[in-house]
Image: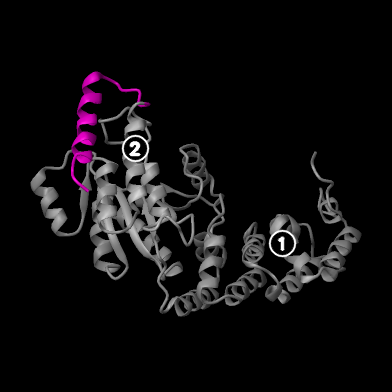
Amino acid sequence: MASEPTLLQRLLRGRTDPAEEAQVLALLRTASGRELDQILTETDAAVLIGSLDNYAFGARNRDAVRELLVGRLGELGIQARANLAYGLQAGWTTVADALAIREIFWSAGGLELTRLKNAMNMRTDAHDLEGLVYADVKSPALRADILEHIAAEASGLEAAEAKVLCDIDDTVVCALHDRRYPRGTIYPGILALLDALDRGPGDEPFSMGDLTFVTARPGDAFGLIENYARASLRRAGIAQHSVLTGTVQAMFTLDLMAGRKIANIQHYHALFPEYRLVFIGDSGQADIKVGEQLWQRLEHVLDLVFIHDVVHTPEDERGRLRGERIHLVDTYVGAARLAYERRLISRVGFERVIEESFAALERVRWSSPEQERSTRALFDADASVPA
C-alpha cells in the first residue's frame, strides 16, 4: 500500500494559492537540517520552487524559498544540492537563479565537488550538467566563475576511471553506412563494453554514469531531439548517461560536424577536468577527424580513441591511423581487448564483453546467411587473439 502523502506533498498538488505558499515556506523554515535534506532529496525541486510565485503587490515567495534554501546549503547532502540546482535550472533560469546555482557549486570542493557534478549530470532529460552550465547559466561572468572553481578544485585530483564519450549512429546502433547488420541492430558487445568502461579497471567504480553520447543530431530549444535520443538509448539498455547534441548547421559538412563535436567535448572536459577521456566513434562520417583533433587538443587527458570501422577501411590506411593513435576495430571484442590491455577495464569486464557479444549475435535477425557468416567471422577472429 502506498504511504500517505505528506503535508508538503498535499500543498504542492496542483496550483498553490498564497496561503498554501506561506505554509510551504513555514514548513521549510522550521525543518531541521536532516528534514530539509530529506525534503530536497525526495521532492521534485522544480515543482517545489515552481509552485511559489512572486506577486506584483504582495509576497515574493519564489525569492524567499530560493534565499532560504541557498542559505542552508551547508545542511544539505550531495543529492539534495544537485536536486536544488535542477529546481533552479528547470524552466526559465533568472539571473538570481544563476547566482544561486553558482553558490551551489561554490559549496563543494575537491572530491565532494566531483560527486556533486556527477549527481547533477545524472538527469535523464536535457537538464544535465552541460545544459546547466553552458545553457541555463546565461551570464558569461557567472559561467566563468563556476568553471574557474571547477578547475581550481580539480587541480591535483585524478579519478580512477575515464569518462567515455561515444557517438550513437553506426557506433551503438547500425543506422547509416554499415551493411554488415540489419538496420537498427544494437551492435553486439557495445553495451557490455560501455558498462565495463563505466566500471573501470577495478570493476568497483568511483562513479557510475561516466558515459556521454556525442551526436551530430541537433538539439532544439525544448530538448525534444535530445530527449528522443535518451529514450532510444534507455530502450537499448543504457540507463545512466548524458547527451551532447549538434546543430542543424553543423550537419552540412563533415568538417562542421567534427568541429561541433570537438567543441562539445572541450566543454565537457572543462566540467570534468579531473577525469581522463576515451572516445568511441565510427568510420562512416566525421569521427576520425574528431579523434585526430582530440589528440592534438586534449592529449594530456586522452587515453584511447576507438573507431568502429563500418566502411571496410583498407589495411594500409588502418596502419597509418594506428600511427596517429586512432584504432579502427571491426567488433567490440577487439575494442574491449585494447581497453583491457590499457587497463581501462577489468578482466571480468573484458570477458563479459566476449560473452555478451556472442550471445547478442544469436539474437540478430540477419538479412542473409552470407551477412551472418561474414560478420561472425570478424568476431571469431577478434576472440581468437590471445589476451
Q: Is residue 312 found left or right of 177 in the rendered image?
A: left
| Residue 149 magenta | no
Front position in the image: 269 or 275: 275
Q: Which residue is mark 1?
A: 40
Q: Magenta span covers which residues?
A: 363-387
The residues bearing labels 1 and 2 have C-alpha atoms spaced at a distance of: 42 Å
Say left or right for 33 vs 112.
Answer: right
Q: Does 368 appear in magenta?
A: yes
**Mark number for residue 262?**
none
**Residue type at tag 1:** Leu
Residue at image point 19% right, 39% down = 384
The image position of residue 46, as x and y in percent, is 69, 57
For the question of whether residue 318 can be seen, the reply is yes
Is residue 74 shown above or below 121? below
**Residue 168 visible to the viewer:** no
Above-or-below relation of 165 to 107: above
Pointer 2 residue: 355
Q: Quadrant of the N terminus?
A: top right
